[in-house]
Image: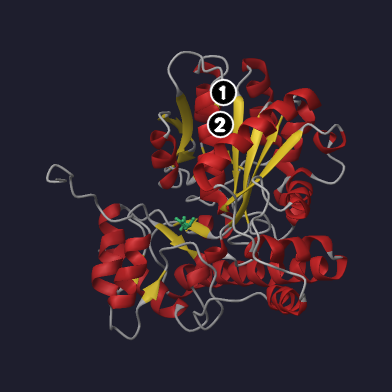
Amino acid sequence: LWQEVPLAPPDSIFKLTAAYKADTYPKKVNLGVGAYRDDDSKPWVLPVVKKATEKLLRNEALDHEYLPILGLPEYTAAAAKLILGSDSPALSESRAVSAQTISGTGANHLGALFLTKFYRFNGAKKVYLSNPTWANHHAIFRNVGIEPVDYPYYNPDTISLDLTGLIGSLQEAPPRSVFLLHACAHNPTGVDPTEEEWDTIANVMLEKNHYAFFDCAYQGFASGDLDKDAWAVRHFVQKGVPLLVCQSFAKNAGLYGERVGALHIVSPDKDTADRVRSQLSVLQRSEISNPPSHGARLVELILNDPEMFAEWKQDIKTMSGRIISMRKELHRLLTQVHNTPGNWDHILNQIGMFSFTGLNAEQSKAMIERAHVYMTGNGRISMAGLNSHNIEYFAESLDKVVRG
Ligand code: LMR
């Protein structure tokens, strides 16, 4: 039995964490996985999360009963408000359906599963993914029988958005195509459309009756402002582009292993929303029965308590602020100290957790093999892995690799 099972390659991102852990070189640097680290390379438990945990522990009325199938209602309602905005027409008209999911990956999966069952695809089941995108998107859609197709997103020559390519692809795709869009802090490029560009994208999507499958894993990480980072989603809702949003609290609340996420499907009216909710419930039941409670309870406390919510915003600013200061320092080291060949302005201009350095696969490999700096083969680095102790070593190593 199982003799015919082929050997699968290890995950392109998590294999780096394992290799980094096994490496004994003292100056090793992990810029692989998108997980926030403090200035001492340590995972950071947000102070507000510590506070919420203490509050949970004091609550003797809590038990370990099952949550409802679609999750903790106080959590999903607050999560929907956070992404859609408390004044969202989708909320006031009761046409947003929310399900608590196993973080953003689970939201993507449940959303994809819902589409494969109920979306009226125009011909073959396809999803348009930005080229490049988070590697896992491909597997998630393939698993439910939806074939990924690339759309142009990033121009390596200008190291910026390929708006012409993107719009061309929206126009050429058959009507009612599904486009996955990164709501903010695009992974892996760190390149987001401007508000004006988002508006142009929304207009074409409306004209063509396309479906927007938003993935929002980094709300707060792009600008440091939760509302600003939700702008594209809210704008699309306002314009009436049909959409769903996948949401994660892994990064912005540092709750990676707790798997706290949500899927929000915006429907045209309440009746439709009720039917969508009933089907989501059936799908969720067969997949996970009911979502885990601990992380959702923490986030619910933070979102629904004005004082803790304010403190969380500060914690987000601490994380995004440190990342921005690393961008400035890296840019300074490359351009003013090492005079590294090439233009490095994109390090400053890109936003969020990641920077797409422009290093090719060979150079990225050399960073690992020669300098013990772990980064993905597409040239992506997690800015959160840089700090005041390792940034000089990183800049020096990058400079050497670029010079060949
Ligand atoms: C990443 O892209 O590094 C993160 O989203 C972690 C993951 O799950 O891949």
Separation of marks 2 and 1 at Cα, in angstroms: 6 Å
Q: Position of residue 188 (x, y in %)?
A: 47, 51
The quarter of the image holding the C terminus is: bottom left
The quarter of the image holding the N terminus is: top left
Q: Position of residue 52 (x, y in %)?
A: 73, 73
Label 2 crowd bin: few (<14), some (14–19), many (20+), radius 10 Å:
some
SS state under label 1: helix
Q: Which residue is mark 1?
A: 118
Residue 58's place in the image compared with 294, above or below, is below
**Residue at 64% over, 22% down:** 204
Q: Position of residue 402 (x, y in %)?
A: 32, 62
Q: Is residue 70 left or right of residue 331?
A: right
* Residue 12 in view of the camera: yes
Residue 177's place in the image compared with 280, above or below, is above
Q: Is residue 91 left or right of residue 267?
A: right
Q: Which mark is residue 114?
A: 2
Q: Position of residue 193 (x, y in %)?
A: 62, 41
Residue in front for this viewpoint, 316 or 403 = 316
Residue in front for this viewpoint, 178 or 157 = 178
Q: Are marks 2 and 1 in contact (CB under 8 Å)?
A: yes
